[in-house]
Amino acid sequence: MKYLDLAIANETIKTTNIKGKEYAEVNQRIKAFRMLYPKGSIKTEMLSNENGVCIFRAMILDDDFNVLGTGTAYEKEDSSFINQTSYIENCETSAVGRALGMCGFGIDTSVASYEEVANAIENQVITQEQADTYTLKFGKYKGKTIKEVYQTDSKYIEWVINNTEDSSLLKVISMATGIVIPTEEEVNRKSELILKIKHLADIDKLDIDDIKDNYDIKSLTELDIEQLEEIVNEYWYRTIRGNK
């Protein structure tokens, strides 16, 4: 494949705008590929499809069966409404788009195709209706909505929150139940403040039991960041002033 031929083929590709940036659709990349390689091949292979997670690999070959490029894509069945019915097809399309992009088709602005970017955005956006009707895909309440489970067994939802690293699932739980789920940064900040309070207790600058009594709590983890910062600032200042 000559660069000039590729450039001419790319001139025929129509792009679609997403948030101010142009992306080539996969069908446009396929058309450009067929201009140069009418007898070429696009081969796809499903590498895995387990627990609602699909992985595809695509391979682009020229008329003489030489490999021009490969691409891999990953999709989750429950990541969006579209994926709930078509996640396998979306995964295959994304893999083909990336493979053609690796060959140089439609990459003036991005290797990612329009479909890949649009699907990624769709996965990030969760509507209230989606959150309210989202069903659990595991455990003893598999098939039931998070909202329904929370109303009958809130402890189970709390367990899910504490044992999952799926940020999308946490977002859905928060929207469906109203539970405020702290971000990773907030969790780290809270842990840092609690460690400072324990350090102050170790050097006899404060009594943790007194704090629990004052706030009517059983554990420091029940306090929010603002309350923990107030405690740290007050006793830290006393420590500094006392050392002068």
Image (cartoon, rainbow, N blue to C red):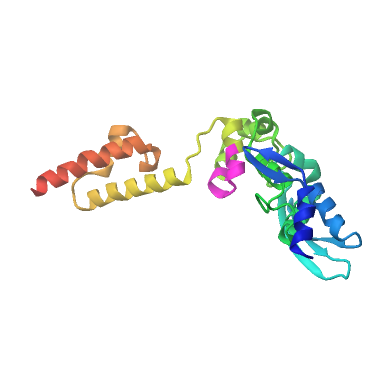
| Magenta region | 160-171
Quadrant of the rendered structure where residue 98 is? bottom right
> Residue 24: x percent and y percent?
73, 46
Of 152 and 23, nearer the camera is 23
The residue under the point 78% across, 54% down is: 8
Please indicate whether residue 218 sits to the left or right of residue 31 in the image.
left
Measuring from the top left, give residue 209's x and y in whole percent.
Answer: 27, 42
Q: Is residue 48 visible?
A: no
The extreme front residue here reads 4
Q: Is residue 24 left or right of 180 when viewed as pictured?
A: right
Which residue lies at the image location 68% right of the left edge and 28% below the top edge? 129
Query: In the rendered picture of this protein, how many numbered marks are placed on residues?
Result: 0
Q: Position of residue 215 (x, y in %)?
A: 32, 33
Determine the residue located farthest toward the right in the rendered image. Answer: 39
Q: Nearer the viewer, residue 6 or 190?
A: 6
The answer to whether residue 3 shows anywhere in this view is: yes
Residue 169 on the magenta span: yes
In this rendering, would 167 be left or right of 5? Answer: left
Q: Is residue 84 magenta?
A: no
Residue 44, given in percent of the width and then of the height, sits at 83, 60
| Residue appearing at x 74%, y 62% in the figure | 3
**Main SS category, magenta section:** helix
The residue nearer to you, when weighing 53 against 8, is 8
Q: Quadrant of the N terminus?
A: bottom right
Q: Residue furthest left?
A: 244
Against 17, is 48 above or below? below
